[in-house]
Amino acid sequence: MAMISILAIIAIPTYFSFLKKAKRVEAESALNTIYKLEMIYSSEHGGDYTDDLDALGFDEELKYYTISITIDQSNPSAGFKATAKGNIDGDDDLDILSIDETGNLVHESED
């Protein structure tokens, strides 16, 4: 019985860590897609970016994350920041990732 308890103490945290990493792939994939769509949009609109997911043609339905995009409305060619936020383990903390016009993917806050 003690051996089972020891194995559980080791295995359960490892399992949840892998589960969070697997869920995080959803955000990384979505943000990389948005980056590519923003590059296409920018090339077709005089260098401007958009904060409109529909205008980009982004129609993926995400299970764990919500996506938002911010741009400088007074200078839409200055850049963008797309952010994915999700609660992937049921606690009060959010997992937050972002990507910008340089393609720099950042894990801002770990859930």
Image (tube, rainbow, N blue to C red):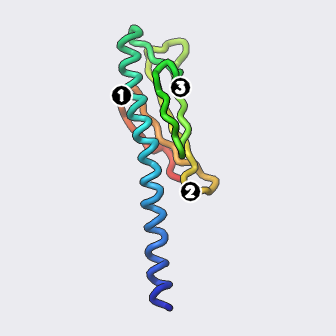
Percent across and percent down for residue 106 are 42, 40
Q: Looking at this rendering, what residue extends furthest in the top direction?
A: 46
Q: Are marks 2 and 1 in contact (CB under 8 Å)?
A: no
Mark nearer the viewer, 2 or 1: 2
Which residue, given by chain and number where applicable, does mark 1 sit on? 102
Residue 102: image quadrant is top left
- Eyeballing the image, is 28 above or below 16? above
Which residue, given by chain and number where applicable, does mark 3 sit on? 70
- Kind of residue at disc 3: Thr
Q: Is residue 79 left or right of residue 89?
A: left
Which residue, given by chain and number where applicable, does mark 2 sit on? 89
Q: Looking at this rendering, what residue extends furthest in the bottom direction?
A: 1
Percent across and percent down for residue 34 are 43, 29
Question: 23 or 96, which lies in front?
Answer: 23
The structure residue drawn at horizontal position 39% and vertical position 12%, both measured from the top left corner, is 47
Instruction: Measure the C-alpha gap from mark 2 to mark 1.
Output: 30 Å
Which class describes the residues within 10 Å of circle 1: few (<14), some (14-19), or many (20+)? few
Instruction: Measure the C-alpha gap from mark 1 to mark 3.
Output: 14 Å
